[in-house]
Amino acid sequence: MSSAGDAALEWRAPSGRLRRIPLVRLGFALAGVFCASLALAQSGDLRRSGYQEMGPALQKMQDDDTANPAMLFVQVGAAAWAAKAGAAGKSCADCHGDAAVSMKGVAARYPAVAPAPAGPVDLEGRINLCRTVHQQAPALVAESDDLLALSAFVTLQSRGLPIAPPDDPALAALRAQGRDLYERRQGQLNLSCANCHDDNAGHRLAGAVIPQGHPTGYPIYRLEWQALGSIARRLRNCVVGMRAEPWQPGATEYLALEAYLMDRARGMALDGPGVRP
Amino acid sequence: MRWRAFAALLLLPAAAWGQQDSIPEPLTGQPGDAARGRAIVANRAVGLCLLCHSAPIPEERFQGDLAPSLAGAGARSTPEQLRLRLVDAARLNSDTIMPPYYRLDGLTRVAKNFQGKTLLTAQQIEDVVAYLASLKD
């Protein structure tokens, strides 16, 4: 509910869009009662994460740090955090200190805008900027275990925190591009992301429930992959499934989609590094 | 056979199929084979049908529920109507999520290995029409 004088009902649709309906003028007494009940009924956030869509067995696997396979990568990432690298001879910890303090909430804010000339980057991109600029080390290969391990370790420090994309105007164009890609049909099957994840979320595509597509758990350990992977890898899977031409690794399109989807998931709890079917 | 299907692909779309509810003429000279059609529908890598639809194909588990069941399709629609729905369901409903199974135009960013290819061949369309038409209840 918004403030008085501009009374309206606002809620989050499953698509993440903010919906707003001005209240019809009713008799004062009636309006009060009506309003309260309607607000209760409709102001609920209808968004559901992939974690919420999973069965209890998989949820349990994710929740148990001794069973979540992504935690093996977190251990590797923790070691990498403390290890000196590159010509500068510095570790991540040398600048950032205790990750539990310095990295808390960081993963929930990405993609974000790095200083020029880098521009918008996702978490993996930010890690590689640190490597090349501050550590003077070669960038880690996209989708490599080393990069995913560091990303998983940093992500863990934000577990349970709400996704909070920055209000940086430099991200607006990227999000708009992402939304356009999300809603545009492509490939031999002529489908858009929205066709499934907005319009048919909750239905079954063959045996699998279609999730709403909120990227709350990346990097994820996907059982289908038997590996940890980034959101770009997951997006690529869907693009290939549509029989569309996948973008090149590192292409802006993946970053744009990620920026849009994280904004769409704003306020949802980050649950990475997650397990997904 | 091949040239005939190709000619149909080139010539028919907008003009002949435009405003109609059906495609009266078969796409090939060879009648569709319902048994082959059933195999195409059942195959998730060929027909893809069961990703969205369920069908009376009990040996295939995990059928989708995004679209109506194919059971009774032959009672609800004529073979000619089924043919149009397979060839390009968007001609009846531009918002449909049903992929165009026999259309090449108006597609974006098709993967290289699928470019210039329809989802099904003309003969496969006829086979699936024959199968669906046989589903009377």
Image (tube, coloured by chain):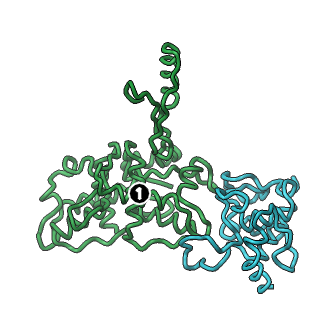
Chain colours: A green, B cyan
| Residue A187: quadrant of the picture | bottom right
Left or right of B24 in this view: A21:
left
Tell which residue pokes out farthest to the top in this image. A29
In percent of width and height, residue A119 lies at: 26, 63
In percent of width and height, residue A166 lies at: 29, 50
Work out whether residue B41 or residue B117 is closer to the camera in this orientation and state it. Answer: B117
Asked whether residue A228 appears in the rendered view, the answer is no
Residue marked by disc 1:
A176
A151 is higher (above) or lower (below) than A29: below
* Number of residue marks: 1
Q: Chain of mark 1?
A: A
A27 is higher (above) or lower (below) than B64: above
| Residue B14: quadrant of the picture | bottom right
Q: Secondary structure at mark 1?
A: helix
Left or right of A95 in this view: A62:
right
A35 is higher (above) or lower (below) than B64: above
Left or right of B131 in this view: A51:
left
Q: Answer few, some or many: residues within 10 Å of disc 1's Cα (few below 14, many 20 plus, some between 14 and 19).
A: some
Three-letter residue code for mark 1: Ala
Work out whether residue A74 or residue A160 is closer to the camera in this orientation and state it. Answer: A160
In percent of width and height, residue B73 lies at: 82, 56
Residue at left offset 76%, top offset 75%:
B12
In percent of width and height, residue B77 lies at: 84, 57
Work out whether residue A181 or residue A80 is closer to the camera in this orientation and state it. Answer: A181
Residue at left offset 67%, top offset 54%:
B64
Q: Quadrant of the N terminus of chain A?
A: top left
Residue at left offset 49%, top offset 34%:
A21
Asked whether residue A145 appears in the rendered view, the answer is yes
